[in-house]
Amino acid sequence: MLAAVRLSRFVLFLCGQLGLNTIVRFFYQWIVDFTERGDPTAVDPASAAAFTAATAGVVILGFRIFDAISDPLAGTVSDRWVQRGRERRSLLWFSLLIPAVGLALVFAPTPQMAVGLRWALLCAGLLLFYVGYTFYAIPYWSLVDDYSQGSEDTRRWLSNMLGVGLLLATILIFVVSPGIIESYGYFESALIFGIPCTMLMALPYFARPAGALRVAMSPSAASTGVFASFAEAFRHRRFIATLAVFSGAQMAFTAMTSAAAFIATDLLKGTRGDIPFFLGPFLLCALVSMFAVPALTRRYGLERLVVRAAIALAVVYAGTATLGMSLIGSPLLTAAVLFALAGPMVAVFLSLEGEAVASCAAESSEEVTSVYFGVFNLVIKGLNALAMFTVSVLATLSSGELGTLAVRAMGLAAGGMLALGILGYYLLPPLLDRLRPGVMR
């Protein structure tokens, strides 16, 4: 009976990540295709696109940088909320509706609208999407620490649930969304996914185990300022190293997600509907591997496992530059096998991200869990915007003289992003030690 109750709490906790990341993955997978190629249901294909991918990419990059300002605010609000003896989970209600509304506005523009209205809808949607994402995600992810009640094993499994939820969301978007978009268009599809996902995002509130309410912190802990808390995170040697390698993995995952539609149509000479055929094996392998990650982490240690996975994944992503060739049967089968090889390594990153951040925050004597997640989100958002901008530029170049070479470069870019993350893991901590000796832990 107790095991069933515990499992139900894990499932309720997972639902928040499934709902949030279905919205997020829909945005990341389709925003480049939407701005470059437009609505597939349009009567006149020549006028289907409302923007160009490169121009919209600049706007998105700007909003991501602006949105980074909300991360320290969200982290501080969340930790101060707990420091005053309130339950962090109650913060979920304030931001529940915002991401889905933002998503709908982003995909609302059509070529029939006035240019000013198109940009107004896109910009309003981006603002709501990113701010809502931040103010929901940071308190929600911080519940990994609150709900674990000091148990490393429970924290590891809660972090694993975040990974499972993200992966299920990715499967849902990769497998289901292409057909829905082909049938209904982008705006209607955003509503089809956004409404039920908002309901799922409410469920982690009910996953709290008995006694998980955090007590109020001492006045001295509560008096730490916003910038002091953030400075503490950037002085944390282990956290900086962890941030570097996970940033590379996040950038690469975002780049490959955005590139999926172009791989299917330009390299494999298929349609958007072919995406599940080569990404399905990848996601299935990742999902199966994910349940082995807690045991592997106990055996090898979190950081060693993550670095090894990053090296292997960089090689696989770089290998996607060969897509379109018949190395194993048909080009589609070759793509399916290659992406399947990436599954186990992606499972490591998705499963351990929450635990990595929460365990670093737990080394502090103060309540800084949400601040650490805020720092993590700030850096990831900025670098993901750079990854999306890179793919957007390559997408525009693929329509010109470079053609398929630009699409092949998307996979090489993803591998390079992971390589930079690995270099940062090894080089940043000693570099910061020399710049600020005796400061970092």
Image (cartoon, rainbow, N blue to C red):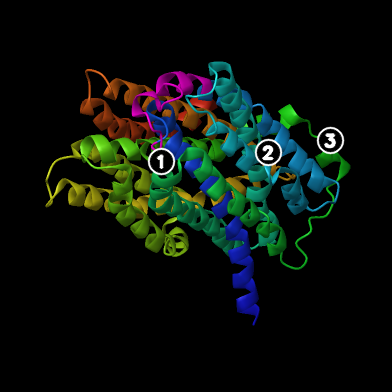
Give the foreground label among 3 and 2: 2
The residues bearing labels 3 and 2 have C-alpha atoms spaced at a distance of 14 Å
Q: Distance between the residues labelled 2 and 1?
A: 24 Å
Residue 333 in magenta? no
Q: How crowded is mark 3: few (under 14 residues within 10 Å), some or many (20 or more)?
A: few
Left or right of 47 on screen, residue 278: left
Against 383, residue 80 (above or below) is below
What amino acid is at disc 3?
A: Ser
Near-viewer residue (365 or 199): 199
Q: Which of marks 2 and 1 is in front?
A: 1
Above or below, 264 relative to 210 = above
Q: Which residue is drawn at 55% across and 62% down?
A: 157
91 to 214, vertically: above or below: above
Write down the quadrant of residue 316 in the picture. Answer: top left
**On residue 253, which mark appears?**
1
Query: Label 2 amino acid?
Result: Val
**Residue, far front:** 43
* Identity, as a three-letter code, of the amino acid under mark 1: Phe
Residue located beneath label 3 in the image: 223
Q: Of 299 and 264, which appears nearest the observer?
A: 264
The answer for how far apart the CA atoms under marks 3 and 1 are is 38 Å
Q: Which residue is drawn at 61% across and 34% down?
A: 130
Is 44 inside the magenta-drawn segment? Answer: yes
Q: Can residue 375 be seen in this view?
A: no
* Residue 173 pos. (x, y %): 44, 49
Residue at 85%, 39% in the rendered image: 220
Q: Which mark is residue 371?
A: 2
Residue found at x 43% / y 25%? 389
Q: What stretch is highlighted in magenta?
A: 40-59
Q: Is mark 3 on a helix, strand or loop?
A: loop
Which badge, 3 or 1, is on the more N-terminal residue?
A: 3
The answer to which quarter of the image holds residue 221 is top right
